[in-house]
Image (cartoon, rainbow, N blue to C red):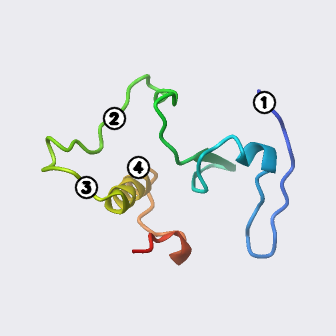
């Protein structure tokens, strides 16, 4: 296993706290959580020009303004991205009403 290993404690609400020095490395407050067997993987939900490529070395185009009829509101794009992530990981349920985008 590479990287720093820490033990996280789950509170009665089901929340865990990501260490502050880790949180400061990401420009986001949203993470994608994937449950696979007995392993939970958290990935920051952010997109920067210097982000690494997907595991297969290719980026997938989810939205193209030229193809999809023009610009899209950022909130609509984020909701579409979340739906795609849920679809990819086999979950159609929203995890919490707190995760909804406020308009």
Badge 4 is on which residue? 88
Badge nearest the viewer, 4 or 1 = 1
> The residue tagged with tag 2: helix, strand or loop?
loop
> The residue tagged with tag 3: helix, strand or loop?
loop
Quadrant in which the N terminus appears: top right
Q: Earlier in the sequence, mark 4 or mark 2?
A: 2
Q: Earlier in the sequence, mark 4 or mark 1?
A: 1
Badge 1 is on which residue? 3
Q: Earlier in the sequence, mark 2 or mark 3?
A: 2
Q: CA distance from mark 4 to mark 2?
A: 13 Å
Residue 72, labelled with which disc? 3
Expressed as whole percent of the image width and height from the top left, the position of residue 59 reads 37, 30
Badge nearest the viewer, 4 or 2 = 2
Q: CA distance from mark 2 to mark 3?
A: 18 Å
Q: Residues within 10 Å of mark 3 (few under 14, many from 20)?
A: few
Foreground residue among 1 and 53? 53
Badge nearest the viewer, 4 or 3 = 3
| Residue 96 vertical placement versus 24 (above, below) | below
Q: Earlier in the sequence, mark 4 or mark 3?
A: 3
> The residue tagged with tag 1: helix, strand or loop?
loop
Q: CA distance from mark 4 to mark 3?
A: 22 Å
Residue 36, labelled with which disc? none
Residue 60, labelled with which disc? 2
Left-right relation of 14 to 70: right
Expressed as whole percent of the image width and height from the top left, the position of residue 9 reads 85, 60
């Amino acid at each position: 296993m590479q990287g720093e290993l820490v033990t996280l404690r789950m509170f009665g609400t089901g929340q865990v706290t990501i260490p502050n020095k880790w949180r400061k490395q990401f420009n986001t407050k949203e993470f994608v959580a994937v449950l696979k067997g007995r392993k939970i993987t958290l990935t920051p939900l952010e997109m920067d020009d210097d982000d690494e490529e997907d595991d297969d070395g290719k980026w997938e185009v989810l939205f193209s303004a030229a193809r999809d009829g023009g610009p899209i509101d950022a909130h609509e794009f984020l909701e579409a991205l979340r739906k795609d992530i849920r679809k990819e990981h086999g979950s159609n349920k929203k995890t919490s009403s707190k995760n909804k985008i406020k308009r």
